[in-house]
Amino acid sequence: MPLPLATEHLRHGARMTDFHGYELPLSFTSILEEARGVREAAGLFDISHMGHFLVRGPGARSAVNALVTSDLEAVPFGKSLYGILPDENGGTVDDLIAAAQDQNTVHIIVNAGTREGDYAFIRERLAPSLSLEDLSSGQVALALQGPRSQEIVRLLGEGFETMARREVRHPVSEDLPLWVSRTGYTGEDGWEFFGPASLVSKYYRLLSDEGPAHGLVQAGLGARDLLRLEMGYPLYGQELSRERTPFDAGLDFAVNLKKKSFTAREQVLASKADPDRERLAGFVLLERGIPRTHCPVFDAETGRRVGEVTSGGHSPRVGGGFGLAYLASPFWQEFQNGREAEVEIHGKRHRARMHPRPFVGATRKNPPA
Amino acid sequence: MSSERRYTPTHEWIEPASSPGAMKVGITDFAQKEITDVVFVELPKIGKKVEKGGEVAIIESVKAAFSIYAPLGGEVVAVNDKIESDPGLVNEDPYGKGWLFELKVADPTLLTELPDEGAYQKLLLSGGGGH
């Protein structure tokens, strides 16, 4: 399905790709150049495929909070929060960003491939007095990411540059029914914009025209995937699924243990204590090669198969091939302690060792709040 | 464009090289754009014998791994070492400095049976070809 900015992307020389049924730019110049551009200055991404839900009605915030692992009621209104939407078995329905504007209004940003399923899943669990709107259709969403984002967002002339990290504005004004958040998925400082195509497309054109003077590059899905993988962030369908809990994926920070109740709290917490579960590990290759999704992983000492790569890539910043893999117990622990693994690529085994996540440091960890 | 250069539906090119009987092989501009940033190339060993359509090399890009097939049968007589240290040459100059290997082709007369520039361009326009 083409998205509203498709013609703009072609004008910028995009090579398009299919992502969960959406046509999106894979790359404009070079995936590596774009990723470098984002780390060193800033990049502009079309993320119109992302889902945007609005929950409204009495007690919307506590109703949504009952569905996610993080604690939306522990953050102030107007701040966004990363969380996991678990199913009744503790498996992951999706990972999302939620932000409550007040007690009765919550915005949720979900993944493209899970949007329809999420809608049904959430609707079923909300009281009839609460409305759940899917605002995604026809919307344009942008992510401006990189250390120079603050300087570039100033070009829009709306004062967004004064927003704090994870601050959300919605609507910006009566004339601007936009959802703007100082968040992103690259590890860099940045802003995300969701709203009607007519409005956000204007931002897109303004940033595309005037941003390059400040180092802004057009960036595609290829760079987006590389940047999130460099940070060790999960991608739903690869690191996360109905078979995996947030603890399996190492997303301990996304589960608020003080929270008294959320869907399948017991099952999710039980997985944390389960010594036999498979767990996600970061690794780097010690030999030339690029690991890819589904490459098998072996214990280098015994030759026994111990897991599978979920995401892999090549990064000059990391220094070669690297990725994430689910590893069986007790090998996962041994791997953490320095034991080597082997990743099979095109029938050949490549030595690998554990690497902590993130694989690289973001350019600026503490943007001014 | 070299008039002697021929193409395959899997987006390799082949043309006579300077040494007699040898033919140079690379990937097309269309292919390098599809493959995106080449990170490294697994080149064949010199002396490797290949059948037409057989896998000779693997190009690893940021995006994925791509098999490179022999446009004609023969023996690998040279490889482009330069792309080992500078794989970006395959993207920057796919018909020149980014060549992959040279084949001593068993039957050089078969070259003219492969699609020429015009036929290859038509194939691209029809959305044909693939890897």
Image (cartoon, coloured by chain):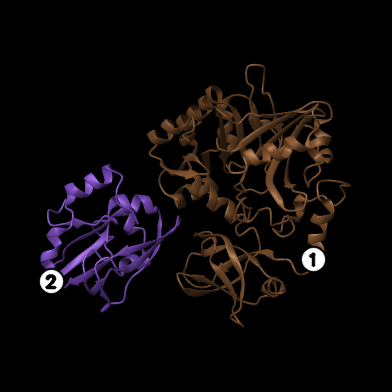
Chain B, which colour? purple
Q: What element carries label 1?
A: loop
Between A19 and A209, which is closer to the camera in this rendering?
A: A19
The chain drawn brown is chain what? Answer: A
Dots 2 and 1 on the same chain:
no
Q: Residues within 10 Å of mark 2 (few under 14, many from 20)?
A: some
> What separation in Å lies between label 2 and label 1 (alpha carbons)?
65 Å
Return the x and y of residue A57 as percentages of the image width and height: 79, 26
Residue that label 1 marks = A274
Say which chain tag 1 marks: A
Quadrant housing the C terminus of chain A: top right
Which numbered dot is residue B21? 2
Query: As drawn, is B114 to the left or to the right of A93?
Result: left
Identified at 47% across, 74% down, the residue is A348
Say which chain tag 2 marks: B
The amino acid type, in three-letter code, at marker 2 is: Gly
Query: As drawn, is A316 to the left or to the right of A326?
Result: left
Identified at 56% across, 51% down, the residue is A227
